[in-house]
Amino acid sequence: MKEIIDFLETDTISATFSPKGLKYLSLKAGQDARRINLRLAPAEQEQNPLAGLVIRETLNFLETGKHDLPLDLSAFSSFQRSVFEVVSGIEPGKTVTYRDIAGILGKPGAAQAVGNAIAKNPFSYFLPTHRVLPRRGLGICRSGAGHLREKLLLREGHDLSKLRGNYVCTRKKCCLE
């Protein structure tokens, strides 16, 4: 049986969703809660009620750090789903390390596998992977993802000087999203 996939694109949000829930979400760079386009034609909302919900929950998440949107994790392995489940429980204002998550999952040597799972996060901010840090702390990032992570952590009240490590990350795609 073919899965029905719907797609939503506004000037600030791209989202893909299935009957099981959100499959992918991306906010275009530099957007915040005040600038998200909330206009959806009534016909579009009627055709796909999840479209309006995605936008409302995105705004809610940007304001509160929480959401009530179902996430479709069916494309991921059981290990990846377990990592996403742990990450989704990290409260705003808290951080953990990849090693911490591996330990919670009963796989203390799997910190790198946790990082690989987190790197595949298709849900933008709905899975708060910005709250998962390397054991040695935040690097001084030179990428857009690193700056975004820092903005999100600052918004949640973190003191970056206490989270920062003593290394400079110069990889093209440093700081996992």
Image: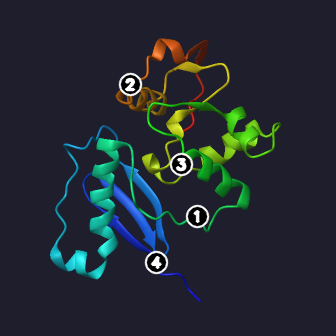
> Residue 73, labelled with which disc?
1
C-alpha separation, residue under disc 4 versus residue under disc 1 = 12 Å
C-alpha separation, residue under disc 4 versus residue under disc 3 = 21 Å
Amino acid under label 1? Leu
The residue tagged 3 is: 88
Hey, which quadrant is residue 153 in on the image? top left
Crowdedness of circle 1 by 10 Å Cα count: few (<14), some, many (20+)? some
Residue 73 visible (yes or no): yes
Where disc 2 sits, the SS reads: loop
The residue tagged 4 is: 19
Name the N-terminal-most of marks 1 and 3. Answer: 1
Where disc 3 sits, the SS reads: helix
C-alpha separation, residue under disc 1 versus residue under disc 3 = 12 Å
Amino acid under label 4? Pro
Q: In this view, does 43 lie above or below 62?
A: below
Q: Nearer the viewer, residue 29 or 136?
A: 136
